[in-house]
Amino acid sequence: MRAEPMINKRLIHIMDKSKKYVSAQVLFQWISLLCNIALMSEIALFLSQLSVGLNPKAWGNFIWILLAALVVRYACTTLASRMSHRAAKQVKEQLRTMIYEKLLHLGLAYQQKARTSEIVQLAVEGVDQLEVYFGSYLPQLFYSILAPLTLFVVLSFVSLPCAVILFLCVPLIPITIVAVQRFAKELLGKYWGEYTSLGDSFLENLQGLTTLKIYQADGYKQEEMNREAEKFRKITMKVLTMQLNSITIMDLIAYGGAALGVIMAATQYAANQVSLAGCLFIVLISADFFIPMRQLGSFFHIAMNGMA
């Protein structure tokens, strides 16, 4: 079975107006990363100089750089969150408007195309799932590509072997995502089918409750609903199990890669190939290679559900 691309071109084309918000969010995340790099380098330099003693000027420089980096990071994080909200708001408004206009165009014959419960579920939860796709997943996808490249360039000036090892470990997470995607596509399709089927049965039984009571068939319909609810429970547990397993694998890769970076830094410091400040900087920054991809994996499951 062929996996769907991580970027859905049809959705991007429909939601063309949200591109500027996605681009702005990625930019603010990247500036925040640069501030974090500056902060970690200053902390590493500060700690390395403690052994030889610090003069008051060094203390002052450290405090000013620390405060400036924190302020800029806070501002960028706030602005990125606002861009995410605006992108999601734009998507929800446009999609629900399109659904409503489509229903008006179909008129009373809309039930020949789709069931009422399915339309309600699509317009409410379905659109909310796509909010995560545009507000979180899509910006994180671009940022998770940009961040390791930026860190690789910066770290290569400190220790090229460490930079290469950490950079080569990063693609293991998207490889895991693609492998999960092949299985998740079919499973989430079944999940959404069971979800809409259960909603349709519930609405139909609720509308015909009086008739069922008159003919004393409500007990039979209750048992039927229980069987459908049990099927939905099982498919939901399969989805949760799949998500938990993939998250566990991504955590192992992320923490294992960061640990490998720490070991490499300690080894190179012992061999006098990097300074103490360089070693501390690698230790502090190694996890940042994997955090963006790890967050992308978290958003991936909700985004896949929205695309389904």
Image (cartoon, helix red, strand yellow):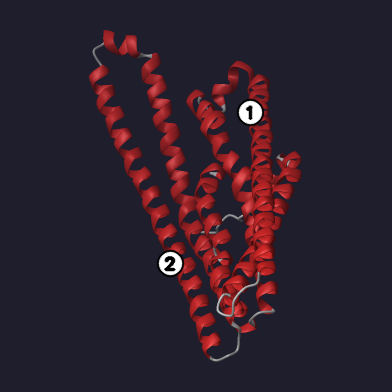
Closer to the eye: label 1 or 2:
2
The residue positioned farthest toward the bottom in the image shown: 271
Residue 195 on image: x %, y %: 42, 35
Q: Quarter-wise, where is residue 232 in the image?
A: top left
**Can residue 212 be seen?**
yes
Q: Is residue 171 visible?
A: no
Of the two numbered discs 1 and 2 on the same chain, state the one appearing first in sequence.
1
- Seen from the viewer's position, the closer of residues 186 and 264 is 264
Residue at image location 72% in from the left, 43% down from the top: 21
**In the rendered structure, which amino acid carries the disc numbered 2?**
Leu
Query: According to the image, label 2 marks what residue?
Result: 252
Q: In the image as oriented, which residue stretches furthest toward the front?
A: 56
Residue 112 location, x and y as percent?
A: 55, 24
At x 41%, y 60%, the residue is: 248
Residue 118 lies, in percent from the top left, at 50, 29
Give the residue pinned by disc 1.
Answer: 96
Q: Residue at x 61, y 78 (%)?
A: 278
How many numbered marks are there? 2
Q: Residues within 10 Å of mark 1 (few under 14, many from 20)?
A: some
Mark 1: which secondary structure?
A: helix
Tell me the kind of residue under disc 1: Arg
